[in-house]
Image (spheres, coloured by chain):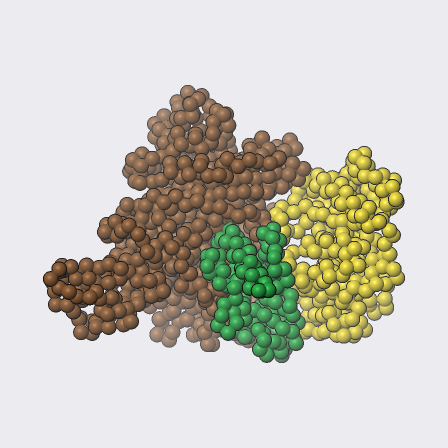
Amino acid sequence: MSYHAPADVTEAVTLLASQDNARPLAGGTDLLVQMRSGRVRPEMIVDIKRIDRAMGVRARDGGFAIGAATPCTELLNETALCKAWPGVVEAANLIGSVQVRNRATIGGNLCNASPAADSVPALIAANASAVVVGPAGEREVPVQDLLAGPGRTTLGKGEFLLEILLPPRPPRSGDAYLRSIPRTEMDIAVVGVGVSLTCDESGACTDARVALGAVAPTALLVPEAGAALVGSRLEDAALEKLAEAVKAACRPIDDKRGTIDYRIAMTAVFAPRVARIAHQRAQEAA
Amino acid sequence: MTKLLDKQELKVVGTRPVRPDGADKVTGKAVYGADYNLPGMLRGAILRSPHAHARILSIDTRKAEALPGVKAVATNADFPKVDMGEIDAGEAGINVDRAGQMCLAREKVFYEGQPVAAVAATSASIAAEAVRLIEVEYEVLPHVIGVEEAMREDAPVLHDDMFTEGLPETPTKPSNVVLRFESAKGDPDAALAAADVVGSGRYSTQPVHQGYIEPQACIVSVGGDGQAQIWCSSQGQFMVRSVTAAITGMNLADLRVVPLEIGGGFGGKTTVYLEPVALVLSKKSGRPVKMVLSREEVFRSTGPGPGAIVDVQIGATKDGILTGAILEMKYQVGAFPGAGCQAGVMHALGCYRIANSRIVGWDVVSNMPSTHAYRAPSAPQSEFAVECAIDDIARQLGMDPIELREKNGVKPGDPSFSGAPYGDIAFMETLAAAKEHPHYAAPLGPNQGRGIAAGWWVNHGGESTAMVSINEDGSAVVATGNPDIGGSRASMAMMAAEVLGLPIEKVRPIVADTSSIGFSMLTGGSRTTFATGRAVSEAAADVVEQLKGRAAMIWGVESDKVEWSDGQARCTDPQQDLPPLSIKDIASKTSKTGGPIAAEKSVNPGDAMQTFGVHICDSEVDPETGHVRIVRYTAVQDVGRAIHPSYVEGQAQGGAVQGIGWALNEAYMFDANGRLDNPGFLDYRMPVASDLPMIDTLLVEKPHPGHPFGVKGVGEVPIVPPLAAVANSVSAATGKRFYDLPLSPARVHAALNGAA
Amino acid sequence: MKKQYVSTIVNGDPADFLCEPQTSLLNALRDELGMTGSKEGCGSGDCGACSVILDGKLVCSCLVLATEAEGKRVETIEGMAQEGRLHPLQEKFLDVGALQCGFCTPGVLIAAKALLDRNPDPSEEETRYWLAGNLCRCTGYDKIIRAVLEAAAELRQERAPA
């Protein structure tokens, strides 16, 4: 196995394209665990942390560009980001422990493509896009388009995720993320719900996006759930419609972390809780 | 010895000095099993079975042996054929042939993860690569995991030489049922039929791992003369020596085991998995071999505590007198008979005076790692069912749960399981202390419930040896053969210091290797402070007699004119005006008075006393999610006398939290192929710091009259009450009885929402 | 496998070593530098026994490749006591009896130090959540949390202007 730490995108792409079994390395909190267990045996590791655009948070086009290899805890120091996207930041900062979050990245979280990844529902709800670089150049796609199935992305040979973009935030917008776990920390989500919404001056939702994690082969955007909130002030009837919509969208499995029944039930419990927090934040953001 | 108990004021015992091994442990200097290295050492690695049940048809190690850097390979064929049956090691006997198969499989594999072959190579990565090159042909067999599934007539049979013991007629067909064990007295059927109320149910628990943070590790070096040394972390260096020698066919005399620091054991390290393998590899390669288990290997191949299904019925009068009990318990002992039902049967009803009872226990093998001791082995499972049934009786009678236990709890003189009367036990005092504790009267909030449960453990005595010697400067060394898993080293030094009359800083405890001290049974069974402490106290007392004799010599007086107090010899002859002699004074003259002063004592006390715990648990249940949060917890425990109160509190707190984990989230999970689905700390969910409140403790001291300092065993009791204390608190919070552990949120949620 | 040369600063001193590319920082510290204070409890970032501070950030050294530490500052348990004087956290752990087997202790101390360096007055809840990545099986965490809170109080007093 060889290790490389290129300083520019072109070199990284060339290295990754040169071998079938080459892997990009950001925080390493998934890759090293999988190498240790024998699940992956890369011939080459391409560390992207020296690439300028892969690290740090920048304002761009009215929104934000987050380097794919930026550690989750670093997001907490970005005041403007925390103000505009508290849900994305809190989702990223539920992953693992403090030790893990000082290395783990939302880029890695997305590309590891676990159906239960914590940052992904928040990113999908936020309508985030992925900037992918590869032999054919640079392309931008909605983050969910990178997800092919459990542990699989749509990235081609030589491609890697360079940045995650968050769109400009209208006033009176808020987002939130909650997850169901058996303990209080250190667990993979049994269910994850991300909600991002925008309100008018009266507190009525003008736009809402609801995304679910751990209840399908990939994280899911649930358009009907967002639609259930639009026009409402999160009255009980709207929240009931929301709960029904998320339940209907679930396609969970029974596994060592949760049962089908429990996961469906928890999406209905957590979606309204998350929506309320997002709504509260939207009104406070005025 | 009784003179010591008359002392009004203990100067050292009961205080909280800094432990002598503490500085090394907080600075990273302490040497644990994996921290030790030898020049020229090789790294060992193990190939493990991917199948839960299979015949091994062939093992081809040629490609592995040809890999550059590989210096030796080993299979079970490298162990001699043994006909030894059981040897006395560990806490119970250890079957040598089976222990050998758990180190390296013979003609069958019985659980996924069972070792099949091993290599030693010049680096860990070469060893890992070599393991991948070993080719094994298996004939895969059907497997069975669950205890009742394994008992069925049509279940795949693991051992064709296993015929159930304890049945009225010895069966002719082999089965997975190892034994049936029964204990009965009176007429329980009549008592239950006549009872005013009955608490009953089918309670179940899953296999749980001891969860020590340090994986097993050792380094073994066989010399050119066939003598071998082992450095390892274990709960007993003498046990390591006996079992390793037996499995590998070595003479005990040729094997020396040096105990390194141990990173947790809880019973799980009272046997060996690596040392015999490393020994064979070292012998074949001529170099030291280091072997360390990965966390995954710890879960896949070391012995957990057994899961169990317990059917319980307990009958009571309307005044709350328990009149009869019938229990049947089935223990899932793993691939080879391991920790099983007998202690469960013995402990089930031991807290209570019940005249009529029948308890039947079954040990059943199945295709998972052979179970092993886990803190009060097999007692939590049976006492869990009993304590929940009693809680239900209290509810039916509208009676305070502590009051119900006070009406029926065992007292000194009541018959114990063996028939012998209980000595100065303190169950009543412990119940009273719990009842008076402010926690018991504290108000509860919404969705909160309070549960209490009692528990007990027999505690062990066992063989221990200790040596106390005096240095030229008047300080002392205390050597024992017991690894320090919870701070016992400090307690040994404190007891010796108390007897000698020295300040604690002048007494240095060490844990000696098998060549440097007489035999000691391992550290476990809640016996170390009790039995080894007795050996230490007796050796120190002998040293005191010697010091007095030397003082008499120095003064030229009769030896009966010398007394010892506050670390000094005083002449009691009123006609002599002699200043006292300190240990230092006497020690500086030993070459003129007869030579060095030291004493070694061996003990094997049979009077270990049973101890009891009563735990109070408040939990809060989120009715929407089923999530259980422990909001307040108090562990009340009867301890005899706390030599070092901080470490006794620590035992109560640590055991309570292991029990809370067992109750809430810990369980082995197997997939359809019999593979362990959660062999790591991510999905084997032990409590983390944010899951818990402070664990308050209350130590009840009613000294053991037969021990120089009144010590009773404390290490194991605290894991017994929490299973029922938590379950009873969740019942109180939700109004529903829970029978199956763990009480994961999904399970609680299902029960609250009407699911089966 | 060709070894790589890595040059780091460990506990303030230059430390360099050779290692295979896939070697973790934990294994490099333990096997190449002989610093066995950081422990492996799981190798997968779930137990925190391997915690070190890397360029000022608390991390699991089992999840960092040794080569990634090139040019970086690593602080381990071996550097916590300064010039033979124990850190107040280390003293408190001994006073309170916040360790039993001691295996998790180096990782817990490093994590607790990282907490107090950044938040000198944590609440009990904040302390528990910060230490959630450090598993302990012996103590039930009670005395660990008490020791950290007491050490924090002492450190605040020491630093308070006279």
- Percent across and percent down for residue B413 are 29, 35
Q: Note the chain letter of the brown one.
A: B
**What residue lies at 29% left-to-right and 54% top-to-bottom?**
B534
> The C terminus of chain B is located in which quarter?
top right
For residue C71, say whether it is visible.
yes
Q: Residue at x 70, y 41 (%)?
A: A266
Q: Is residue B752 above or below residue B275?
A: above
B740 relative position to A160: left or right: left
Q: Quadrant of residue B248?
A: bottom left
* Residue located 42% across and 67% down the image: B231
The picture's colour for chain C is green
**Foreground: B124 or A250?**
A250
Rendered location of residue B331, percent (x, y): 46, 41
Query: Picture coordinates of residue B178 (x, y %)?
Result: 42, 43
Chain appearing in yellow on the rendered image = A
Counting labels gives 0
Tell me the quarter of the picture where residue A72 sits: bottom right
Using residue B225 as the reference point, say whether residue A203 is left or right of it.
Answer: right
Return the residue nearer the eye: B523 or B111.
Answer: B523
Residue B263, placed above or below residue B442: below
Q: Is residue B480 visible?
A: no
Tell me which residue sits at (74%, 55%) in the image. A89
Residue B612 at x, y = what percent?
Answer: 40, 41
Q: Quadrant of residue C65?
A: bottom right
Q: Nearer the viewer, residue B137 or B572?
A: B572
